[in-house]
Amino acid sequence: MIYTTAREWTDAPRKRALLFGMSGLGKTHASTLLRSSGKWFHYSIDYRIGTRYMGEHIADNFKREAMKIPFLRELLMSDSVSIASNITFDNLSPLSTYLGKPGNPDKGGLPFDEYQNRQNQHTKAEIASLMDSTSFINRAEEIYGYPNFICDTGGSICEVVDAENPSDPVMTELSSNMLMVWIKGSEAHTEELVRRFDRAPKPMCYQPQFLLSCWTAYLEEKGKTPAQVDPDDFIRWTYARALAHRQPRYAAMSRWGVTVLAEDVYDLKDDAGFIALIAQALENRGSGA
């Protein structure tokens, strides 16, 4: 940990923190609040993945679909139009759309092999984007003059690290340069996330072994072939299991840093509140609370 006491954190002229936890618990809310203060550089892992490492994959997927339409095919073949992803901090839909969902192609599903391939692409991109954070800490200060740095990670960070391994290269790199902060939700938060996901299921990135076990179990339980699977039904069925799978992995990561509660993050109004919240978390860790 680069800060071991509340005073070290509060007095540090350069504050560097990384937020992790389930999607929907306030990572981007806190990061956006800090960025709006004008004192913090906001580094979004998902944005980095979608622009630097997955941008070509996403654009090529758009082009494949466009090539199926004669009018657009003619324009693309003559270089009369260009197609690109317009991904932003607030709109990561191009990335999630590319990841897709496995199942019946008539319902927008992907063959499971292709789904696994895209998941693998995302895993490699996520690791690379996480490892890039150190260079962005330096760039943020040298180029833009930001003294403070907040790393806004995706919910799947726990799938690409082994926090139980004290030599894990990604965890070692991240914790050596930033304070790891787990935004922990309650059972009520989990229930709300499941309800929200059920209303609007979105593609997610999973650990390969977990994904394969879920796919196999789903096919057996539902008595369906891969081509018969309703893509939305599968990812709804998998989501609650994914949250339970991730919880102990987040908890293991938290031992590399500090823990704050989601409701306290929701209540943040400014960067001073964030600094105070982290200081309290460091005090709690020091006292064993």
Image (cartoon, rainbow, N blue to C red):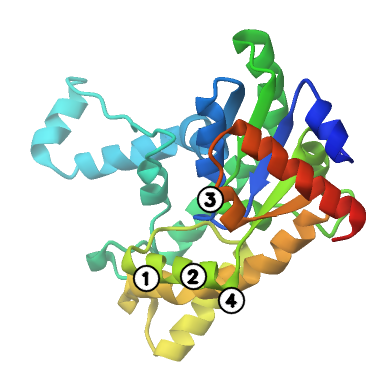
Q: Amino acid at mark 1?
A: Asp
Residue 117 lies left or right of residue 40; in this view the side is left
Q: Would you name the residue on which mark 4 appears? A: 213
> Residue 239 got which mark?
2
Q: Quadrant of residue 136?
A: top right
Mark 3 residue element: helix
Q: Which residue is mark 1?
A: 198
Q: Position of residue 273 (x, y in %)?
A: 63, 38
What mark, if any, has residue 278 been given in the picture? none
Q: Which residue is at the front of the view, 149 or 109?
A: 149
Which residue in the structure is indicated by mark 3?
Answer: 266
Indicate which disc, 2 or 3, sits on the residue closer to the N terminus: 2
Separation of disc 2 and disc 4 at Cα?
Answer: 13 Å
- Nearer to us in this view, 150 or 77: 150
Q: Mark 2 or mark 1: which is in front?
A: 1
The residue under the point 61% across, 73% down is 244
Q: Are marks 2 and 1 in contact (CB under 8 Å)?
A: yes
> Which amino acid type corresponds to the residue marked 4 in the rendered image?
Ser
User: Which badge, 2 or 4, comes first in the chain's sequence?
Assistant: 4
